[in-house]
Amino acid sequence: MQNPRRVRDLGVVVGTLPTGPLNAITDVPGVRVGQTTLTGDGLNTGVTAIVPDGYDETLPAAVAVGNGYGKLIGTTQVDELGVIETPILLTGTLSTFRVADALVTWLLDRNPRATSLNPIVGETNDAYLSDIRRRPITPEHVHAALDTASPALPLEGCAGAGTGTTALGFKAGIGTSSRTLASGTVGAIVQSNFSGLLTVLGHPIPATPVDADGNSCMIVVATDLPLDARQLARLARRAVFAMGRVGSDFAPGSGDYAIAFTTNRAPGYADADLRGPFQAVTESVEEALLNSLTMARTTTGHRNHTAHAVPHDLIRGLT
């Protein structure tokens, strides 16, 4: 049995920009990630929490919708105001609403004066490997992910909200990556669960389709560049575009979303200088998507369904 390895450790280098020290979304200063994983008894699911410092005072943000077949709680207020005011959480489809409620409870406990909150919770459908109808996520699972959020390298593959997901014919999950620019850092974390033909640096990697209907991808992009909400929307759109670089077929049953935020509240970045951030987000999302597959393990779950990890020998050293 092969051990999970990041795609860069397999000799596959995406793009030309340098990564951050961890090659993760947590390379962006002030961004932490926590996860809770549930396995066994027909369950392969969990929660992934992206917790930026300063969310309680609002941070500039934007959402891009590639295909709206999904449940992304809180988007209309982000579109209207151009900010987030809570952490961003990811989970399985039918647990989305319980996770949102638990997030609100966690936030109210920390702010006795709050009378309105806009929780941001996204999802992908992990029903192939997990008994999704049980809606197993409890407030304790959500609070544990939030309370343990750390600036360390997040677990990838079969972890948190990616425990039961599949993509491009293989077992997938959580993946992360980052790029550094002279002016700051761009990082991404993904929950991969979509159909298509896995493509690594232009090389197709055939697989037996696990779910021809897609089932979605959530992408969260963080940066410390001084971007406003309009510019962040442009980054978020490029994040969705990056799915095509790894072979997504953008199926009609797939809910593909990107949320981009900055920890820098002082906008002043010129549109003419966005080429670097555009390249950074595209490269970091592409590599995060590949990491979500190469870091996953073969998994058997609900109804004895099995999703196989991509064989590393098929992609090792591709250029």
Image (spheres, helix red, strand yellow):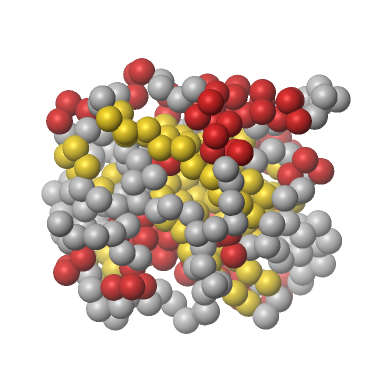
- Seen in the picture, residue 91 relative to 251 is either above or below; the reply is above
Q: Nearer the viewer, residue 53 or 181?
A: 53
Q: Residue at x 51, y 67 (%)?
A: 22
Q: Residue at x 54, y 38 (%)?
A: 145
> Looking at the figure, which quarter contains the N terminus?
bottom left
Left or right: where does residue 19 sit relative to residue 206? Answer: right
Instruction: Give residue 206's position: percent from left, percent from top.
Output: 16, 59
Tally the numbered discs.
0
Q: Residue at x 16, y 69 (%)?
A: 313
> Looking at the figure, which quarter contains the C terminus?
bottom left
Left or right: where does residue 168 sit relative to residue 161? Answer: left
Q: Can the viewer see residue 144 in this picture?
A: yes
Instruction: Give residue 45's position: percent from left, percent from top.
Output: 37, 34
- Seen in the picture, residue 267 relative to 164 is either above or below; the reply is below
The quarter holding residue 8 reads: bottom left
- Seen in the picture, residue 123 relative to 6 is either above or below; the reply is above
Left or right: where does residue 67 sit relative to residue 319? Answer: right
Q: Can the viewer see residue 239 in this picture?
A: no
Instruction: Give residue 301's position: percent from left, percent from top.
Output: 22, 33
Instruction: Give residue 312's position: percent from left, percent from top.
Output: 21, 65
